Image (tube, rainbow, N blue to C red):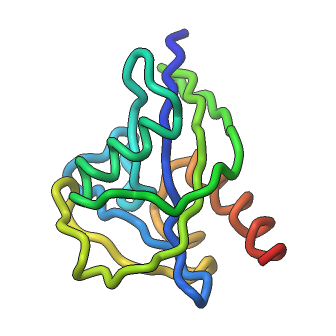
Amino acid sequence: MERRDVAVVAFYDSDKNVLLQDRKTINKRGERWGFFGGGMEKGETPEQAIIREIKEELDYHLEDFDYLKQLSVKYPDIFLVGHVFVAPLKVNLEDFNLQEGDGMKLFSMKEARNLNIAKGDHMVLDELEKHFEGI
């Protein structure tokens, strides 16, 4: 089974709402919403990958972020290893220049859990809840 490393970031606001990307036309597993990020390129560190991905997807230079956790999820066709970062949302959504996807929106944790998101993103939400308890 093929292994693929990805880097994703969970942007969150002061109310601990999370920013998700509308993936209606770019989904990989039938999900409608997901975290921003993507596949790591050969030789990239997870940190380099997330900075590049956010520049590509939001035309934004990500500077203030922390490593949260590595998560793994097995799908029928691929084994994904996710490097998960968290970043406080320090800009207005209008300051992002969306380059990929069909939109973006802030959701409460409860709302996010009820969305059509990938299995791995549910795992990210679990880890975010633990992280939010500490801040």
Q: Nearer the viewer, residue 52 or 21?
A: 52
**Residue beneath the point at 33% across and 42% down:** 52
Residue 81 vertical placement versus 23 (above, below)? above
**Residue beneath the point at 62% across and 80% down:** 110
Q: Is residue 128 found left or right of 75 in the rendered image?
A: right
Q: Nearer the viewer, residue 94 or 34?
A: 94
Q: Position of residue 65 (x, y in %)?
A: 55, 59
Q: Position of residue 116 (x, y in %)?
A: 45, 62
Q: Quadrant of the N terminus?
A: top right
Number of dots carrying numbers: 0
Residue 21 vertical placement versus 133 (above, below)? above
As drawn, the residue found furthest toward the top would be: 1
Q: Is residue 125 found left or right of 43 in the rendered image?
A: right
**Residue beneath the point at 25% across and 71% down:** 96
**Residue beneath the point at 68% across and 38% down:** 70
Q: Position of residue 131 (x, y in %)?
A: 76, 66
Q: Is residue 40 found left or right of 103 in the rendered image?
A: right
As drawn, the residue found furthest toward the bottom would be: 15
Q: Which quarter of the picture shows residue 106?
A: bottom left
Q: Is residue 1 found left or right of 36 in the rendered image?
A: right
Residue 60 vertical placement versus 120 (above, below)? below
Q: Which quarter of the picture shows residue 135?
A: bottom right
Residue 72 vertical placement versus 44 (above, below)? below
Q: Position of residue 94 (x, y in %)?
A: 23, 82
